[in-house]
Image (cartoon, grey):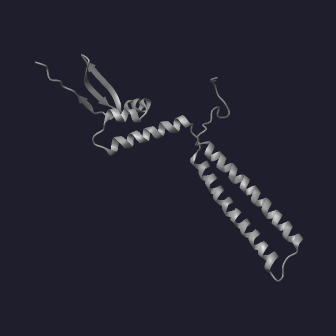
Amino acid sequence: MLRSGKYESDVYLSKHVSKDAYEQDVFEKDLLISEKRKKERAISRLKNLYLFDDESISEKDYVVEKKSLSEEIKVIDERLEKIEKDSTSNFTISDDEFISKASYFIMTQKLTEKRYINFDAFVRSVDTKIIKEFVNSVIKKIVITDGKIASICFKNGLTHKFTYKLKE
């Protein structure tokens, strides 16, 4: 429903990810990964201290410290998982969209790699909807006179005019 009038806050907010939010997530992710490595090294040193040091710590102290560090790592892992889930949910595409983009990419690669293109084989290898979208993105207007193409106007401003020889 559309509304008119003055509002104290924004009525509509875009769901697009802002660059600042993305950079903040990347920064937080880097910090969390660094913190996780520190905790894992601390567990390793604690284990070495408990097992191999002459002045080893008691088993109770070892278990308490290890449990504390393991819980901190678990919290970090959960936060990293949440950041990863949030970042991927903004960039997910459906299977149809993926196939469409892949077909478009394959089509443009085939068009740029060869000077001669076997159109019949090319049309069979690429989805016709993709070809239609490509033609619509390149061609602005086609003029047909007496059942023959008179001119093609491209979106970049170029116009190609056709002339036909009269049959005698």
Instruction: Tell me the residue at 61%/45% (across/down).
Output: 88
Q: Which residue: 44% across, 29% down? A: 129
- Residue 84: x and y in percent read 65, 50
Which residue appears farthest toward the top when viewing the image? Answer: 146
On the rendered structure, is 66 left or right of 110? right
Q: In front: 118, or 97?
A: 118
Residue situated in front as seen by the camera: 103 or 45:
103
Q: Residue at x 31, y 44 (%)?
A: 114
Identify which residue, 52 or 28, lies in the foreground. 52
Quarter assignment of residue 50: bottom right
Which percent across, then down, holds residue 135? 37, 31
Determine the residue positioned at 67% across, 50% down.
83
Of the 4 image quadrants, the one containing the N terminus is top right
- The answer to whether residue 49 is above or below residue 18 is below
**Image-quadrant location for residue 60:** bottom right
List x then y, in percent, for residue 8.
68, 33
Residue 63 drawn above or below residue 155: below
